[in-house]
Image (tube, grey):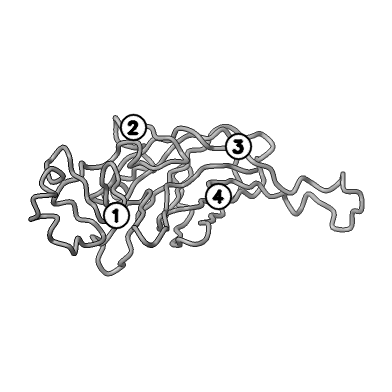
């Protein structure tokens, strides 16, 4: 879940006030579910080329969040040489004639786990413009992303906010105070890199499921709070 929470200015409230109507609203929400521009970045060039400043490459498609980029057709066709995170231990898949029809280029079917429609390994970028409510100006804003798989870095209006790495807790970013009212442009970079010593050891930044484990991780599910 992607949320933006606008916390009240502590200077605007009287700590000794007893009338609840004199205390500013604790927080409110702005829903960001919908279409986000998306660009796959398998060669990790987006930060070097400053996509957060220039925008995503021309022709970058829009995807629905919450959702999986694989289920929306972004990635490479699955084939016999697909570098799965897990290994196909039972080599009969490559030799047994019973599996021959499922080794054909247009009919690949791996019997050992839930197979995505397409495969992608590397980083992905998500970007959109957000209308900033007038009453958010001068208030502290927090950006929260849930179900990130499992590293993320966020920029807002060309300013890097921070990075997080976790599969089990939401990624929270202190955006600070937005001024003036109008629009802001958050850029979200995600990757499933799970070996800091070997950047090639990655899975997809979207949904990934392995038979027997029952776990999955998905692209950020967006919601916004003020």
Select label 3 or label 2 by which is in front: 2
Circle 4 SS class: strand
**Discs 3, 2 touching: Cβ within 8 Å:** no
Helix, strand or loop at label 2? It is loop
* Quarter of the figure that contains the C terminus: top right
As drawn, the label of residue 113 is: 1
Give how far apart the Cα atoms at labels 3 and 4 are: 18 Å
**Circle 1 or circle 2, nearest the eye:** 1
Which residue: 58% across, 42% down? 224
Q: Residue furthest bottom?
A: 197
Tell which circle, 1 or 4, labels the residue nearer the N-terminal end: 1
- Image side of residue 222 versus residue 98, left or right: right
Find residue 107 and report its horizontal and vertical position in percent.
17, 39
Q: Which residue is mark 2?
A: 61
Query: Residue at the location (64% across, 34% down)?
Result: 133
x then y, percent, for residue 130: 53, 35
Q: In the rendered image, which residue does mark 4 sit on?
A: 143
| Labels 4, 2: front one | 2
Q: Residue at x 57, y 46 (%)?
A: 3
């Amino acid at each position: 879940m992607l949320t933006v929470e606008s916390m009240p200015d502590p200077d605007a409230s009287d700590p000794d006030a007893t009338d609840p109507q004199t205390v500013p609203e604790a927080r409110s929400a702005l829903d960001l579910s919908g279409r986000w521009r998306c660009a796959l970045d398998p060669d990790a060039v987006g930060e070097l080329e400053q996509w957060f400043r220039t925008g995503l490459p021309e022709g970058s498609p829009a995807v629905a969040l919450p959702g999986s980029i694989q289920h929306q057709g972004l990635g490479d066709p699955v084939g016999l040489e697909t570098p799965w995170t897990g290994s196909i231990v039972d080599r009969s898949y490559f030799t047994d004639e019973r599996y021959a029809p499922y080794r054909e280029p247009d009919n690949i079917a791996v019997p050992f786990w839930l197979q995505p429609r397409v495969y992608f390994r590397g980083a992905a970028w998500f970007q959109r413009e957000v209308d900033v409510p007038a009453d958010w100006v001068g208030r502290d804003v927090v950006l929260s992303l849930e179900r990130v798989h499992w590293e993320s870095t966020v920029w807002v209006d060309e300013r890097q906010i921070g990075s997080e790495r976790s599969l089990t807790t939401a990624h929270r970013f202190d955006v600070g105070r937005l001024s003036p009212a109008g629009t802001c442009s958050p850029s979200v970079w995600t990757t499933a890199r799970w070996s800091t010593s070997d950047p090639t050891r990655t899975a997809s930044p979207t949904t990934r499921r392995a038979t027997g484990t029952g776990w999955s991780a998905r692209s950020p599910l967006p919601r916004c709070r003020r």
